[in-house]
Image (tube, helix red, strand yellow):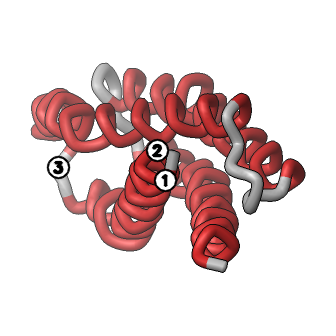
Amino acid sequence: MIWLFLAHLAATLYMTGLVWFVQIVHYPLFRLVGENRFVAFEKQHTWRTGLVVGPPMVLELVTALVLIWQRPAALGVFEVWLGAVLLGVIWASTIFVQMPLHLLLGEQPTRQLKRDLVRSNWLRTVAWSLRSLLVIYGAAALMG
């Protein structure tokens, strides 16, 4: 069961680092891509980003769900469920906010849409950061 938690820890920490990079570096740089080139840029960005974020996001989700039902005794029920709720917030924000914004940016990019993407992504950035604290706390609990 420890391997499952370690996979979960790795996926969560990876995604937390990545979301901070996206929030502070990547999304703000969107404004430097000219409007006439942005549609092509966005299509490539979306495809390539999916390759980098898809597998670890799915791994994090699957391991979080398994940990709910096969929770090691050292992990608190509250922490596991709080982590799952935060992951639900992340997925909901991804599906219902960030993905639609990326679709709109891929059709008719505007400065406002780019700003909306950066602002709305703070929710995921904070949620993943809190999840990282929880899984680090869980790792400490598992190590005794």
Q: CA distance from mark 3 to mark 1?
A: 48 Å
Left or right, 63 with reference to 7? right
Residue lying at 49% horizontally and 53% vertically, measured from the top left: 2
Residue 8 visible in rendering? yes
Question: Quadrant of the rendered structure where residue 22 is?
Answer: bottom left
Does residue 36 appear anywhere in the picture?
no
Answer with left or right where residue 114 lies relative to residue 21: right
Query: Which quadrant of the figure has residue 37?
Result: top left
Give the amino acid at mark 1. Answer: Ile
**Quadrant of the rendered image containing residue 107:** top left
- For the residue pair 5 and 114, the one nearer the viewer reads as 5
Q: Secondary structure at mark 1?
A: helix
Residue marked by disc 3: 34
Q: Position of residue 67 (x, y in %)?
A: 64, 39
Disc 3/disc 2 C-alpha distance (Å) = 44 Å
Near-viewer residue (73 or 93): 73
Badge 1 vs badge 2, beta-carbon distance below 8 Å = yes
Where is residue 50 drawn, in percent x and y? 26, 32
Q: Which residue is mark 1?
A: 2
Report the residue at 66% width, 79% height from top.
144
Quick one: 32 or 12, which is closer to the camera?
Answer: 12
Q: In the image, is 140 to the left or to the right of 60?
A: right
Inspect the image, locate mark 3, and give the three-letter code of the amino acid beneath it.
Gly
Marker disc for residue 4: 2
Q: Are marks 3 and 2 in contact (CB under 8 Å)?
A: no
Horizontal side of residue 8 vs 51, given as left or right:
right
- Residue at 48 percent across and 41 percent down: it is 60
Above or below 105: residue 141: below
Q: Residue at x 35, y 68 (%)?
A: 21
